[in-house]
Image (cartoon, rainbow, N blue to C red):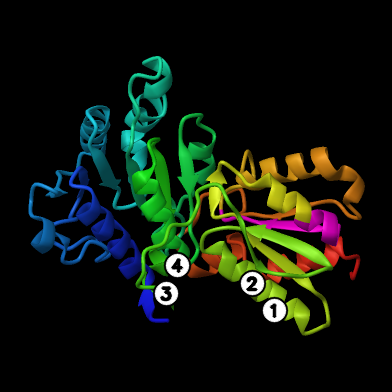
Amino acid sequence: MREIQFREALREAMSEEMRRDKNVFLMGEEVAEYNGAYKVSQGMLDEFGPERVLDTPIAELGFAGIGVGAAMNGIRPIIEFMTFNFSLVAIDQVINSAAKMLNMSGGQFNIPMVFRGPTGNAGQLASQHSQNFENWYANTPGLKVVVPSNPYDAKGLLKSAIRDNDPVIFMESELMYGDKGEVPESEYLEPIGKAKVVKEGTDATIISFGKMMKVALAAAEEMEKDGHSIEVIDLRTVRPIDYATLFESVKKTNRCVIVEEAWPLSSIATDLAFNIQKNIFDFLDAPILRVNNFDVPVSYAPTLLEAVLPNAEKTIKALRSVMYLD
């Protein structure tokens, strides 16, 4: 099977869906003439023209609102935020319009649209450009929130998101756009709301998503060197959450560590830990541990950046703790 970059997988997903459905269009800052801030939309203006690949002013609230209005009229917009840090400017349209319109209209208006772009830390970009808002959006009824970790899932999930009749928040990572992975040339979709067991194991379960999957897998591989079998689950979707797959895994391993880049308070990890202990408490042989970003703004300095972010070393320490190895 061919290998392509994460950005190429996203581009293929959008382009295929735009060829399939003339109502799909892409709108955002620098998506057209500049070929995308991260070259995700490279070449799409040439193929689809300026009526379907639209550059916007630096006005997230405005073009997010235009997207909601288009979706109410049966069009399927893909709204790209240059970073989800900038989506805070548009959050009123996302939360109070897109997420609520189906309910407020008594079922008269579906909002078939995708808000997509990079999330989280991307190196030395300092506090205002290094934040994770997956849990913010996942807190909102009416939204679906997808965070893929590899090119295969990115393409299949984005195609599903574009076809979905509800608004989908699709969050990527600047640090993953160049990652390569196997992606078939044939048509395929990945289901929203279904987690994936990426690595099977028997001694403990790691649950993660997005680029933190790299941390989870690195920790699992290191533990294997000492003879420990670690199961790794990629959530892929943080709203809705596939609790059935998580419960099945933890029932088998009896121990759980959750790795997430966001701050710990009200994080996805917090909800996972609560629901696991609520539903399958009798299967747990140790407390559930979370590995999150420290509860501080992310600094510019590389030493501080390394100190506050989740990594394999911190994850291994948590695994050793739940396995009573230390």
The location of residue 75, given as percent across then percent down, is: 22, 36
Q: Quadrant of residue 151?
A: bottom left
CA distance for labels 4 and 3: 11 Å
Residue found 23% across the figure and 48% down from its top: 21
Instruction: Identify the residue position indicated by label 4 in the image.
Output: 152
Q: Which residue is mark 3?
A: 179
Magenta segment includes 259: yes
- Tell me where residue 210 appears, x and y as whole percent: 52, 59
- Check disc 1 and report the residue beneath it: 221
Q: Secondary structure at mark 4?
A: helix
Disc 1 marks a residue whose amino acid type is Glu
Span colored in magenta: 249-261
Q: Which mark sits nearer the N-terminus, 4 or 2?
A: 4
Q: Of label 4 and label 1, which has the lower sequence position?
A: 4
Q: Nearer the viewer, residue 196 or 86?
A: 196
Considering the numbered disc 3 on the image, is that residue within a helix, a strand or a loop?
A: loop
Locate residue 60: give its quadrant. Answer: top left
How far apart are the two marked residues, 2 and 1, measured between alpha carbons?
Answer: 6 Å
Label 1: few (<14), some (14–19) or many (≥20) C-alpha neighbours in 10 Å: some
Q: Percent x, y for residue 319?
A: 79, 65
Count how many numbered circles sit on residues in the image. 4
Local packing at callout 2 (Cα closer than 10 Å; few below 14, some 14-19, many 20+) is many
Q: Is residue 196 left or right of residue 225?
A: left
Residue 217 in the magenta stretch? The answer is: no
Question: Which kind of residue does numbered mark 3 sit on?
Answer: Asp
Residue depicted at 37% across the width and 54% down the height = 159
Q: Is residue 110 visible?
A: yes
Q: Are marks 2 and 1 in contact (CB under 8 Å)?
A: yes
Which residue position is annotated with label 2? 217
Helix, strand or loop under label 2: helix
Work out whether residue 243 or residue 88 is closer to the camera in this orientation and state it. 243
Discs 4, 3 touching: Cβ within 8 Å? no
